[in-house]
């Protein structure tokens, strides 16, 4: 096939008797510095129109309206700024004109070779993707199965151990729904139930209920006994009867109750101090002509008498106890008086 040399610069031409290359023909052409021949006969308006319709490249070059233009474009492919883009345009126009037979043989062979190579590469790529996808899916499935096993509860793991399951059997069990796993565990549990143990448990059920009821009653009685005990203890400490619950909690270690009890005792101590001071004043008044019948016990008895007048159903003891609760300051003075009476002789 003939070869063409382009952009060849000849610096010297010498005459010889006989040329070295027999049969070699050299065609010398003068370069046209003006507009290239493949751009002739087209106005700028025509080029713009051809570009807009796709008959030319976007810049208006290589306008191909007919087979003649196609031939010129093929001959001028070597002058293209972007040969690949120009060649693709020429092929497209050749197909549009139904003149693909005008394309150079090497173009067609190269295109077929490229298409074959592209198809082969696409197949290889598809096979690689398919293999990678299958491998990835297998890995995902394996990891998902392992994750399901990790999510089994302690009871479900115990069931698998009791059944002596292999790793694959454990994964298959983990793949079941929670309902299916629960049903399998229940079925095994039912199979392992001892009928004698079931009968004994059934017979003991009423006794267990009675025992539970007795425990509740005992707890209630104990609570009531504790209530009475600590109400009495509170009364002995000079507190109100309803302070018994606070005293019980304090003795059981309740920090808040202990703090409240300390505060209440401090209040009572303050009241006792005031009572002692008042008692001193009263003693002085008594020594200057008092009737001697106005001690704290008498005051409390007077309050009790008033309560009995308001409620005749109250006994003397009940009225006295209620007056002690209603007047803790008087009761505190009574207690102080009692303590003073039983104090050892000579005590300060």
Image (spheres, rainbow, N blue to C red):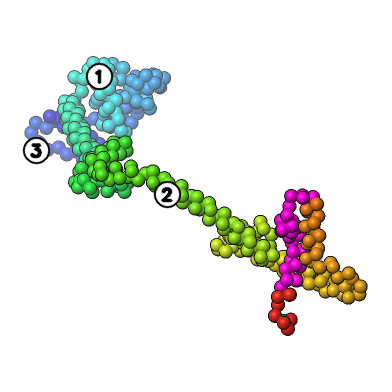
* Residue 249 vertical placement versus 82 (above, below): below
Q: Which mark is residue 95?
A: 1
Q: Residues within 10 Å of mark 2 (few under 14, many from 20)?
A: few
Image quarter where the N terminus lies is top left
- Magenta stretch: residue 218 in it? no
Residue at (61% x, 60% y) in the render: 230
User: Splitting the image into 4 quarters, where does residue 98 fall?
Assistant: top left
Q: Which residue is mark 2?
A: 211
Residue ranking furthest to the right: 289
Front residue of 305 and 107: 305
- Marks 1 and 2, how far apart at CA: 101 Å
Q: Residues within 10 Å of mark 3 (few under 14, many from 20)?
A: few
Residue drawn at 32 percent across, 27 percent down? 36
| Residue carrying label 3 | 20
Residue 305 in picture, x, y percent from top left: 80, 56
Query: Can you tell which of label 3 and label 1 is closer to the viewer?
Result: 1
Q: Which contiguous range is marked in magenta? A: 310-339
Q: Nearer the viewer, mark 2 or mark 3?
A: 2
């Amino acid at each position: 096939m003939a070869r063409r040399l382009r952009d060849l610069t000849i610096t010297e031409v010498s005459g010889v008797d006989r040329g070295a290359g027999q049969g070699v023909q050299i065609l010398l052409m003068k370069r046209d510095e003006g507009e290239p021949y493949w751009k002739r006969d087209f106005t700028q308006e025509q080029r713009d129109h051809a570009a807009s319709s796709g008959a030319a490249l976007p810049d208006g070059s290589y306008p191909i309206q007919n087979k003649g233009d196609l031939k010129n474009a093929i001959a001028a492919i070597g002058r293209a700024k972007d040969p690949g883009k120009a060649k693709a345009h020429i092929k497209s126009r050749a197909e549009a004109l139904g003149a693909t037979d005008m394309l150079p043989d090497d173009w067609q062979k190269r295109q077929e070779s490229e298409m074959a190579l592209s198809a082969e590469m696409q197949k290889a790529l598809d096979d690689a993707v398919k293999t990678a996808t299958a491998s990835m899916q297998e890995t995902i499935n394996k990891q998902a199965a392992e994750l399901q096993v990790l999510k089994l509860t302690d009871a479900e793991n115990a069931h698998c151990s009791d059944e002596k399951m292999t790793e694959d059997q454990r994964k298959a069990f983990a793949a079941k729904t929670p309902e299916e796993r629960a049903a399998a565990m229940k079925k095994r549990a039912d199979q392992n139930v001892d009928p004698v143990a079931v009968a004994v448990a059934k017979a003991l059920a009423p006794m267990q209920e009675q025992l539970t009821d007795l425990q509740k009653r005992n707890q209630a009685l104990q609570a009531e006994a504790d209530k009475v005990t600590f109400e009495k203890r509170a009364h002995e400490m000079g507190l109100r009867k309803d302070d018994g619950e606070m005293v019980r909690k304090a003795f059981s270690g309740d920090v808040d109750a202990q703090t409240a009890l300390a505060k209440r005792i401090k209040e009572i101590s303050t009241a006792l101090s005031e009572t002692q001071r008042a008692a001193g004043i009263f003693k002085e008044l008594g020594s200057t002509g008092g009737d001697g019948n106005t001690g704290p016990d008498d005051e409390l008895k007077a309050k009790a008498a008033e309560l009995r007048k308001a409620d005749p159903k109250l006994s003397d003891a009940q009225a006295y106890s209620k007056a002690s609760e209603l007047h803790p300051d008087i009761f505190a003075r009574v207690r102080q008086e009692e303590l003073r009476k039983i104090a050892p002789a000579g005590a300060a």
